[in-house]
Each structure stands twice: as C-alpha cells, then as structure tokens.
Image (cartoon, rainbow, N blue to C red):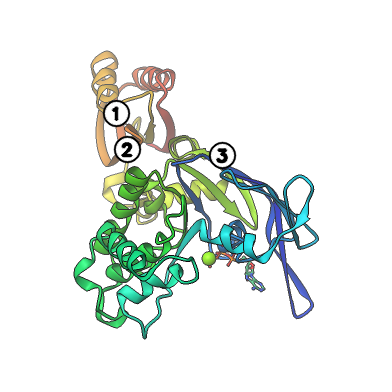
C-alpha cells in the first residue's frame, strides 16, 4: 500500500513562490492502477516526484509498502517513528524500489537497448551473468529481445517506451510511476503501451500510479482516479463513480471532453436541423449509469407512455464492466405523456437534462 498524508511542496522562483502540491493525501492499494488527472501545472509531476523522493517535499508523510514510514518536516527527510534523518543508502534503496517512466522516455542515446536496461543494475552487487539474465528477462517482458543491440534512435516511440519500462522494472520494483508515458505517442503505440501496463499489472501484481491529462488513459487502464487542480486533490474515488457522478466543475470538463455527447453544443450553436424541435417536443440529454440501461429505458417509455424518441447522438461505453454514457434525443408526444416519461426515467436512475423546448 502507498499512503500519502498531507504532502506539501512549494517552489520559490525569483522571489515568487508556487504551491505545487498542497496538502495532498492519497491511499493506493497494492496491485491497483491509480490515475491522477489534471491540467498542465496542476502539480501532478511534482506529486509523483515527491513519492519516490526525486523531489524533496517540504512536509508530509509517506508510507510505501513495508518500508519504514517517512516523515518530512521543513524539507528534512526522516524515517521511522523515532524520526531519524534518512541515510543516503536508505534513500537509494527506496528509489530503487519504485520504477518510473516519462513522457520523453529519458533513454541514454549513446547506449544500446541492452545497456539502457542494465544501467539501474549497476552497483547493486549483481554479477555480470546475473545482469545479463535480468536484462534478457526484462526485454522478454516488454517483447523486445530482438532489439537488444539497437540504439534508441533506431526505435519507434512505442519501442522506446518499452525499453524505458524494461529499465524501470529492472530492479523488480513493486511500484511503477508513470508520468504522461503515452502523451508523446500516436494512438496505436498508446494502445499498445497501455495494454502492456495492464498486463504487467496483472502478471506481476505491479502497482501503477499513472499521471495524465488524458481521460482516455484513465478510462483504459485505471481503477481509481484522483483529480488534481491547483496543487490539490479535488475529487477521488473509483473511476466509475468519479466519471458517472462528477462533483467538481473540472471533473465535469474532463468527462465532457471525452464524450461524444459534447458535440451537441456545437449543433445547438449552429442551430443544426438535427436539434430543432417542433412545438411540444423536447430536446433532452439522457445519462445512463450502472443502475439504468439505455435500450430498455427507451423501449419501456415508448411503450408505456406513447412517446417517441429520435436519437440525435448516442455514446455508451463500458467502464469497470458497467455501462456509462447517454444520448441526446428529441422526445415527441403529448405534454402529459412526456412529463410522465421524464418522471419514470428519473425514478429509474436516468439523469435527464432538457436542452431545448419546442
Ligand atoms: N523546479 C521547479 N521550480 C519552480 N517551479 C516549479 C518547478 N517544478 C514545477 N514548478 C511549478 O509547480 C507547478 C506544478 O508543476 P508540475 O510540473 O507538477 O505540474 P503538472 O501537473 O505535471 O503539469 P504538466 O501537465 O504540464 O506536466 C507549476 O506551476 C510549475 O511551474
Ligand atoms: Mg507534468
């Protein structure tokens, strides 16, 4: 388990100070894939760099696996309940127990794939043969054994990130921190790297904290998510609950950005014929979640209340095995029937928003 309590980090730059991380508390269970999403400057990278102490927080508490708890007070890293200053050796051991990958891969350009993966194994006391075996084990894990003698410049972006993942896991860490690992990749390579992370999580029980500004990454691999804004975690929970019932504006923005239903705003602005309504008709947005299933709702209300539903846009996806999504539709029928149908839907956990009245 990773536990972060009340973590703070302020940078001072030319007399100005920036509160990059403010009072962040998070718990990540072993074997979870935990996403942190936020816009640029929200403090995501600073937060993950504080977790492996690449960056020294100003204050806070960290518990990582079975290691001694770490308390930071006034920028001093202390370990154990007695709060003894951390030793260089402990710090190095801790950093080795957490792998990290980056947006721009951070490979050594003048070293081969083999040498890049072997790099973190230096000074670990492993023999030459053990290092060779470990590197080959890692390259097999990321499916790159045939590239061991290639240089980074001879690889595609996706292959470079595979090398970086092999290097990050060379010391068999239980935790992998991923800072925008797919942000520089095309959609196919992104899909393949996300697939690899998912399979490493399942095969090795690897706990992954994935920082991103892309909803697609969160939806694709994460089980839990924290939304960061201005140095703070403003919302947190299971991916399904956070995205099905966003409470903060910023979370709503992320949800909308990933939803095809968002296109209705453009159609409304253009006054497209698709969203025009006749007197008595309604243009509505219907949102479904775990407890309401789209197609049965539509057939139920058209049968029960003699209203007809013309679908303009629809988008339902499956998150954590449950449907999430909705549709934009024109509802036609008598005033009374439409009112009854809307009531029925709300009683059956369909969120209804009226966008236009004819
Ligand atoms: N070394 C530093 N010195 C001064 N300010 C910094 C430093 N590192 C980060 N900051 C500032 O801290 C804030 C948070 O930065 P951070 O890099 O953590 O954000 P981020 O969420 O990772 O953004 P992005 O999505 O652009 O990577 C920003 O205002 C940034 O300018
Ligand atoms: Mg960043």
Q: Which mark is residue 247?
A: 3
Contact between labelled residues 2 and 3, with CB atoms less than 8 Å apart: no
Q: How many marks?
A: 3
- Percent across and percent down for residue 97 are 51, 56
- Labels 3, 2: front one: 3
Label 1 beta carbon within 8 A of ligand 1: no
Q: Which mark is residue 294?
A: 1
- Percent across and percent down for residue 243 are 45, 40
Label 2 beta carbon within 8 A of ligand 1: no
Q: Quadrant of ligand 1?
A: bottom right
Q: Local crowd at mark 1 within 10 Å, few (<14), some, or many (≥20)?
A: many
- Labels 1, 2: front one: 1
Contact between labelled residues 2 and 1, with CB atoms less than 8 Å apart: yes
Secondary structure under the numbered disc 2 in the rendered image: strand
At horizontal 42% and vertical 55% (from top left) the residue drawn is: 172
Q: Disc 1 and disc 3: Cα gap in Å?
A: 23 Å
Residue 116 lies left or right of residue 26; in this view the side is left
Query: With respect to residue 199, does 14 lie above or below?
Result: below
- Percent across and percent down for residue 23 are 71, 50
Residue 129: image quadrant is bottom left
Let me know if residue 182 appears in the view: no
Residue that mark 2 sits on: 327
Looking at the image, is mark 1 or mark 3 earlier in the sequence?
3
Q: Local crowd at mark 3 within 10 Å, few (<14), some, or many (≥20)?
A: few
């Amino acid at each position: 388990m990773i536990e972060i309590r009340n973590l703070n980090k302020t940078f001072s730059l030319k007399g100005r100070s920036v509160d990059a991380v403010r009072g962040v508390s998070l718990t990540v269970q072993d074997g979870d894939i935990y996403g942190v999403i936020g816009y640029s400057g929200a403090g995501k990278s600073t937060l993950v760099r504080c977790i492996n102490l690449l960056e020294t927080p100003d204050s806070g508490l960290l518990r990582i696996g079975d290691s001694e708890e770490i308390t930071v007070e006034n920028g001093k890293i202390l370990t154990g309940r007695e709060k003894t200053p951390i030793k260089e050796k402990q710090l190095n051991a801790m950093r080795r127990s957490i792998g990290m990958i980056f947006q721009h891969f951070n490979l050594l350009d003048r070293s081969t794939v083999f040498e890049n993966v072997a790099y973190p194994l230096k000074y670990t006391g492993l023999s030459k043969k053990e290092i060779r075996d470990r590197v080959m084990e890692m390259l097999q894990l990321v499916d790159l054994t045939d590239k061991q003698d290639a240089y980074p410049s001879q690889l595609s972006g996706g292959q470079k990130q595979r090398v970086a993942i092999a290097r990050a896991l060379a010391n068999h860490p239980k935790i992998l921190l991923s800072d925008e690992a797919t942000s520089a990749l095309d959609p196919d390579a992104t899909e393949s790297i996300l697939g690899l992370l998912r399979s490493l999580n399942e095969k090795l029980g690897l706990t992954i904290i994935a920082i991103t500004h892309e909803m697609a990454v969160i939806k694709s691999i994460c089980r839990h998510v924290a939304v960061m804004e201005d140095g703070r975690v403003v919302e947190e929970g299971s991916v399904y609950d956070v995205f099905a019932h966003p409470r903060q504006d910023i979370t709503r923005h992320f949800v909308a950005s990933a939803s095809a239903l968002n296109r209705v705003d453009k159609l409304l602005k253009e006054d497209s014929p698709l969203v025009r309504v006749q007197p008595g008709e309604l243009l509505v947005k219907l949102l479904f979640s775990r407890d309401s299933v789209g197609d049965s709702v539509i057939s139920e209300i058209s049968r029960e209340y003699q209203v007809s539903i013309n679908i303009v846009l629809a988008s339902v996806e499956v998150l954590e095995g449950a449907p999430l999504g909705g549709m934009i539709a024109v509802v036609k029928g008598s005033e009374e029937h439409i009112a009854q149908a809307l009531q029925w839907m709300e009683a059956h956990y369909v969120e209804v928003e009226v966008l236009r009245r004819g």
